[in-house]
Amino acid sequence: MKSILSLLFFLSSICGFSQELISSELLPCSIYWEDIYRERIASQRFSHDTLYLEVNLSANCAVQFKPTLKSSNDSLFIELKNTSEIYDACNCCYTMLFTITGVQNSSFKLFINNKEFIFSKSKYIDIPPRNIPKELLKNEFTIDSLKKGYWKIEGIKGNYHIVFFGNEPSKENEPIWIKSFNKKGELTSVSVAAEKPTDHYSIGINLRMYEQILNEIAAEEQTTK
């Protein structure tokens, strides 16, 4: 009898901790998607066992999502099925809100349509800082002969490039970003890698937009202090 009661208590504990998607809301599109934006968890808040999530994601401008939730161990899997019969020639940077119950702590992993979403303070992918101290330009290799950290690479006619390969470079050893300068030390171009290194392409950012992004990032950092 005692063992049966213990089993019933165990089963009720499992049921009590199951996750359930209580609500979701796709906010109206206000920004057209560009590759410099990051799909991310923008904020997460707990109240007892209820998780309130805000995520940014890319989707077609005419999308209509029907979400479902599954969970396994410490992972939450949200599937967003597009029920719209319309397709527009544009993508939006959407904000989507989720309320999920039964989440016990913040150590969960979130997957949306099989892609992992992680928390990031900035809506942008890795953007090069305005200034890089000279002492960081070490042109170092890992023990596997991969370029790591910050590199200064000489070009032709006195031009040069500051390249960042990451502190833990991927096996592809693609640059995270590149800043190019003329012989006077004036910035001439900025390019950053796509969000996934395996995409093998870079995104050019015009200098006016680059300055605007840096100012936005500085403002974000001020508000979070």
Image (tube, rainbow, N blue to C red):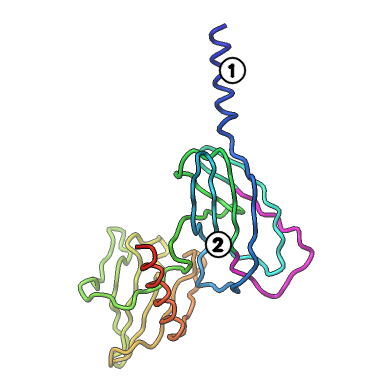
Q: In the image, what residue occupies the spot 50% across and 57% down?
A: 41
* Secondary structure category for the residue under label 2: strand
Residue 81 covered by magenta stretch: yes
Q: Quadrant of residue 115?
A: bottom right
Q: Amino acid at mark 2?
A: Asn
In this view, which residue lies farthest toward the right? 85
Pick whichever, 214 or 35, lies toward us: 214
The residue depicted at 49 percent of the width and 45 percent of the height is 46
Q: Which mark is residue 56?
A: 2
**104 or 108: nearer the viewer:** 104
Q: x%, y% of residue 160?
A: 31, 85
Classify residue 57 by image quadrant.
bottom right
The magenta segment = 78-94
Q: Is residue 119 magenta?
A: no
Q: Secondary structure at mark 1?
A: helix
Would residue 155 be found to the left or right of residue 21 on screen? Answer: left
